[in-house]
């Protein structure tokens, strides 16, 4: 008597018995099926294994249904041609005045599908300078919770040589003129010199005001710059004018602040000075100059 079984179960039994080393004749006797059935199942299995396929059955595809917004496709295309950045909400408002009786969700989904992709903005060119020609300096605030329980907004100072990976950091409770000059002196001592020029934003210790495109520099900072014989360069409205100083705070946050705790501001400055020295040793050992 032949035992009835589903086709999938029969295929599984034949394949597993064949993989265990049983001959086709033995499989025929064991399962009570014909030799042609065993031969056909194993041949189909071999073809399936050698071709690209998926063990999961394909999901049934539904027939596309007409939507209310389909009648307004040409109108939406015309709106995109005239106003490339028009919103789905505004398109919905226009279509409602022209007889559209559907909902906003249908318009939004269709607009999201057919809106032309934005062209990627070209990368800005980073200015290059010769060794010792240019530096960049900036400030960035950080709220620090000290282990003593005090919370203080610390102003991080950065001075970066644009031709090399050398950076100098310090931290102050304020970003006033005295802190700015002290940070520069620390950088000059660390680097044993300074760049011929340095780029700043419109911070008050450097620039008192602008008259058109002409910066009016702080006289006290100009006297400081004259003593160390470098020229300040103030910029505004140009995010690519000092990219290395902006990027330096990314390193300050992730490589210095992360994983450290500080007793107070003096402890933070001491650890920061040690980190600046250690970072320079690591860069030198890696072959950078």
Image (spheres, rainbow, N blue to C red):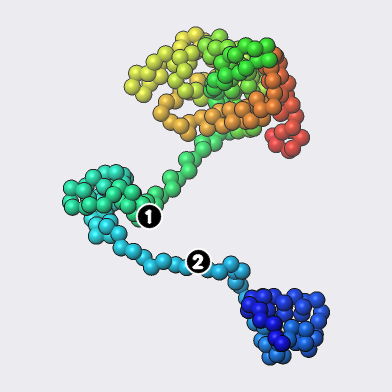
Say above or below: 81 vs 265: below
- x 41%, y 28%: residue: 237
Looking at the image, residue 222 sits to the left or right of residue 63; the answer is right
Tags 1 and 2 touching, CB below 8 Å: no
Q: Which residue is mark 1?
A: 113
Which comes sooner in the sequence, label 1 or label 2? 2
Who is closer to the viewer here, 7 or 131?
A: 7
Give the total of numbered labels: 2
Residue 202: quarter of image? top left
Residue 286: quarter of image? top right
Q: Residue furthest front?
A: 1
Say above or below: 85 vs 266: below
Location of residue 225 in the rendering, given as x and y in whole percent from the top left corner = 54, 15
Give the position of the N terminus as an image quadrant: bottom right
Residue 196: quarter of image? top right
Say above or below: 54 vs 118: below
Who is closer to the viewer here, 247 or 193?
A: 247
Location of residue 93 in the rendering, given as x and y in whole percent from the top left corner = 23, 45
Q: Is residue 132 visible?
A: no
Say above or below: 45 vs 73: below
Q: Which residue is mark 2?
A: 59
- x 58%, y 67%: residue: 56
């Amino acid at each position: 008597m032949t035992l009835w079984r589903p086709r999938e179960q029969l295929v599984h039994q034949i394949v597993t018995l064949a993989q265990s080393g049983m001959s086709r004749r033995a499989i025929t006797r064991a399962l009570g099926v014909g030799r042609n059935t065993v031969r056909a199942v194993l041949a189909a299995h071999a073809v399936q294994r050698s071709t690209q396929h998926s063990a999961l059955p394909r999901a049934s595809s539904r027939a596309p249904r007409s939507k209310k917004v389909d009648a307004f496709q040409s109108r939406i295309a015309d709106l995109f041609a005239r106003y490339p950045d028009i919103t789905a909400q505004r398109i919905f408002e226009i279509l409602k005045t022209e007889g559209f009786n559907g909902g906003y969700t249908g318009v939004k989904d269709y607009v999201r599908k057919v809106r032309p992709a934005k062209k990627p903005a070209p990368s800005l060119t980073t200015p290059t300078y010769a060794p010792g020609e240019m530096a960049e300096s900036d400030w960035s605030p950080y709220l620090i919770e000290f282990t003593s329980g005090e919370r203080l907004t610390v102003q991080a100072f950065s001075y970066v040589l644009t031709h090399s990976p050398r950076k100098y950091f310090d931290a102050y409770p304020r970003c006033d003129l005295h802190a700015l000059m002290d940070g520069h002196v620390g950088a000059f001592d660390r680097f044993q010199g300074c760049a011929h020029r340095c780029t700043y934003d419109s911070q008050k210790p450097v620039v008192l005001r602008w008259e058109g495109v002409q910066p009016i520099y702080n006289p006290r900072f100009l006297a400081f710059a004259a003593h160390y014989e470098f020229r300040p360069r103030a910029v505004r409205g140009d995010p690519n004018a000092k990219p290395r100083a902006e990027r330096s705070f990314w390193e300050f946050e992730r490589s210095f602040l992360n994983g450290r705790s500080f007793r107070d501001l003096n402890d933070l400055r001491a650890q920061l000075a040690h980190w600046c020295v250690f970072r320079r040793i690591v860069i030198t050992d890696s072959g950078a100059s």
